[in-house]
Amino acid sequence: MKCPECQGEYDDSFSFCPHCGRREKEPESATPMEKPLTSRATEEVKEERLVLVVDDDEGIIKLFSMNLRFSGFKVIAALDGEQAVMIAHRKKPDVILLDIAMPGLNGFAVIEKIRNSEHINHIPIIIVSAYFHDEYVQRAKALGISEYMRKPVDPRDVVDAIERVLGQ
């Protein structure tokens, strides 16, 4: 499919454009996963928070997106670092989930670009990566990330980390 907003191409199994986050108008009979759900802790409708998921693996994006939407978050996605920086500037997400190993700009370069931009340098970043060497964790923390999670990770733990970071 081709997105009418950003002209990005994506698989029709996505219910949104992974490049810019644009969604087609939801049908009246939207499934429960597409509607904001109640918070597990408070049972009140959550203020919709926007999460930018950045990973070059579409399967990971789909998994995290589904679980985040189920937990009441809005989700946009980027398949590489350059898209991530562009979308972060345009959409100003509340939090970014970021992989380290990606083609083009890797996760560290993305963090540096975001931290060097006065318009988006406040956005919390959670690393979700298979690379869990001490030097990677220390480098990421020195760049100002909020949390570093090791893949494979339970998607519920990702939701918990986002809620911690956002203070919910």
Image (cartoon, rainbow, N blue to C red):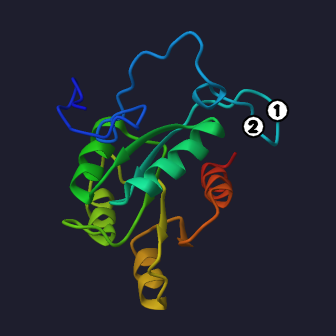
Visible in this render: residue 122?
Answer: no
Q: Which mark is residue 112?
A: none
Residue at numbered disc 2: 39
Identify which amino acid the numbered label 2 is placed on: Ser
Picture residue at 72% right of the left edge, 27% below the top: 45
Q: CA distance from mark 2 to mark 1?
A: 5 Å
Element type where label 1 sits in the image? loop
Q: Is residue 119 left or right of residue 95?
A: left
Q: Please, what is the three-letter code of the amino acid marked with disc 1?
A: Glu
| Apparent side of residue 140 relative to residue 38 in the rendered image (left or right) | left
Q: Secondary structure at mark 2?
A: loop
As drawn, is 140 to the left or to the right of 17? right
Tell me the quarter of the image containing the N terminus. Answer: top left
Callout 2–callout 1 Cβ contact below 8 Å: yes
Q: Is residue 87 visible?
A: yes
User: Residue, x 26% and y 59% (percent of image)?
Assistant: 81
Determine which residue is flagged by label 1. Answer: 43
Pick whichever, 34 or 92, lies toward us: 34
Coordinates of residue 135 in the picture (x, y in percent): 42, 89
Q: Is residue 102 above or below residue 67?
A: below
Q: Position of residue 68 (x, y in %)?
A: 58, 44
Please tell me whether residue 29 is drawn above or below residue 88 in the rendered image: above
1, 110: nearer the viewer: 1
Classify mark 2: residues with Cα within 10 Å, few (<14), some (14-19) or many (20+).
Answer: some
In the image, residue 68 sits, relative to residue 7, either above or below, namely: below
